[in-house]
Image (cartoon, coloured by chain):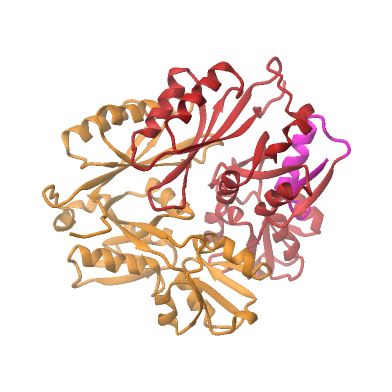
Chain colours: A orange, B red
Amino acid sequence: MNIGVLGPKGSYTEKATKQWLNRNHHESDNSLKYCDDIQDVFFALNSGSVDIGVVPLENSIEGSVGVTLDMLLESDVSVIGETVVVVEHCLLSRGKKEDIKIILSHPQGLAQCRQFLKEQFRNVELRTTGSTSHAAKLATEFTEMAAIASKEAAETYDLDVLISNIQDRKQNQTRFFVIIPSDGQQLFENITQYNADDQDYKTSIIVYLDRDRPGALYEILSEFAQKDINLTRIESRPSKQSLGDYVFYIDLEGYINDGIIKDAIYNVKSKVGMLKILGSYPEYKTDLI
Amino acid sequence: MNIGVLGPKGSYTEKATKQWLNRNHHESDNSLKYCDDIQDVFFALNSGSVDIGVVPLENSIEGSVGVTLDMLLESDVSVIGETVVVVEHCLLSRGKKEDIKIILSHPQGLAQCRQFLKEQFRNVELRTTGSTSHAAKLATEFTEMAAIASKEAAETYDLDVLISNIQDRKQNQTRFFVIIPSDGQQLFENITQYNADDQDYKTSIIVYLDRDRPGALYEILSEFAQKDINLTRIESRPSKQSLGDYVFYIDLEGYINDGIIKDAIYNVKSKVGMLKILGSYPEYKTDLI
């Protein structure tokens, strides 16, 4: 399989991809294609240059990755998997701490280390890059540059770890989605095969509520609550039409073809302006049995 | 009054502040104190160096301003007002378009112009600053630098507007909160005075649901729905404890001391892990009568 990931080499997305492949026993015959940014992973999927994509979705310190949410809504993709990676940011450089004038990272990396940067590097220039590993790659060029990226990126680009574990909370995790083109589901039957005996499942949907019905979110939640369907996440995101107009990203426990889930989604559909089913996938569990 | 705003001169926050003062007839005897970033506005309030602060809360393209949400939760502040500013980003520089190698802006400015940057400046270096006006100020130094900021910032720093209206959607608005220290409410009686005859009010709260009660959000919404209280916004934000653990920012129509709102909040309080009342304030209306 050709797998599109956020590149270059050494990104957290690469780590997430390897972890997901490993857990799902798809280690062999894969080739990673490193994309410049998150949007490009979606474009590579839609152009057919990769079969599968892996993208960061949300982080436990800084929250949702906006561009991923937007692309999930705009692109014809389905979610077939999720995985969670422990994120331990390090400050990487070829220079010394006192020489650092510029710090580079993905906007999420900078935001997850906001306190650290403010306390220790208040007057340093901050630059954003398409990924943390791209920041590491650029930081090899000048000793006055440092990157916020992973230990693995330090090894990949032969940088020194000046300070480790610099994110604002010790506990830091990022959740990733594994995605395929919506029309390609049958090609991945071996991966997406439903196996309720061994697996719990989650289903992700996006709903757009009509603006002039402020009680609509309550009605939707009530549909799920009445059927005892657990929601594991509700995230609002601007519809981009006007202020105060949102789409909601909802994750729930269950498989899309379970009768109860199917019924609930059917009912919800009749109450909202738009409903998009992103897909059902095995739930990530921290401790594998 | 001393008012803390995101500086330097020429920021959208400054524009929001003037608009709010003007609408509320507090134009006289004010002195603006320009802060380096959003956190510093909160710190200035808590240290007493300013009486009032104005901070950006959410944007119609890119959504919530994470650091503002976090500081509203962590700081002892109350919200006494809101205002909405139309945002028309421009590309500002002393150089020519073809010479631009570096583009600077606040992370929200960069994100609101993501498509534009990708299509027209794919290989340009992106740098983040504490505000769009700070980006404009820095862009005066080199002709190969450009800033994403307002027309007003171009005038303030004598920069050329290379391209105007560059955000990814024509319609672009940012909502701001006007905040004071929580223990200072009586000092602002003239501003915060309740006037139900002439004004509609909104109330903002933050709730933290216990993680092991997935139906809790539904129960809260049901409390408001039963009382016909309209919710104008629900926004989730990581609690920063662990992935899948959220606090919710809720805006509702009504004044905190209205019997019906008071009752609802009292009931909600008994069902959640934490409830913080940010305050009640006159609703911003686009068309003043």
- Provide the residue span drawn in magenta: B1-29
Decide which of B178, A205 is in the foreground and name it. Answer: B178
Q: In the image, is residue B114 part of the stretch drawn in magenta? A: no
Residue lying farthest to the top in this orientation: B197
Quadrant where the image shows the C terminus of chain A? bottom left
Query: What percent of the width, then of the height, locates residue A151?
Result: 42, 76
Q: Is residue A38 left or right of residue B146?
A: left
Is residue A263 at all visible to an observer of this figure? Answer: yes
Q: Residue A125, relative to residue A43: is it above or below?
A: below
Decide which of B263, A179 is in the foreground and name it. Answer: B263
Q: Residue B125, relative to residue B237: is it above or below?
A: below
Query: What percent of the width, then of the height, locates residue B11?
Result: 73, 50
Q: Quadrant of residue B215?
A: top left
Query: What percent of the width, then of the height, locates residue A148?
Result: 51, 71
Q: Is residue B250 left or right of residue B143?
A: left
Q: Is residue B80 left or right of residue A159?
A: right
Q: Residue at x 44, y 79 (%)?
A: A154
Q: Residue at x 79, y 27 (%)?
A: B190
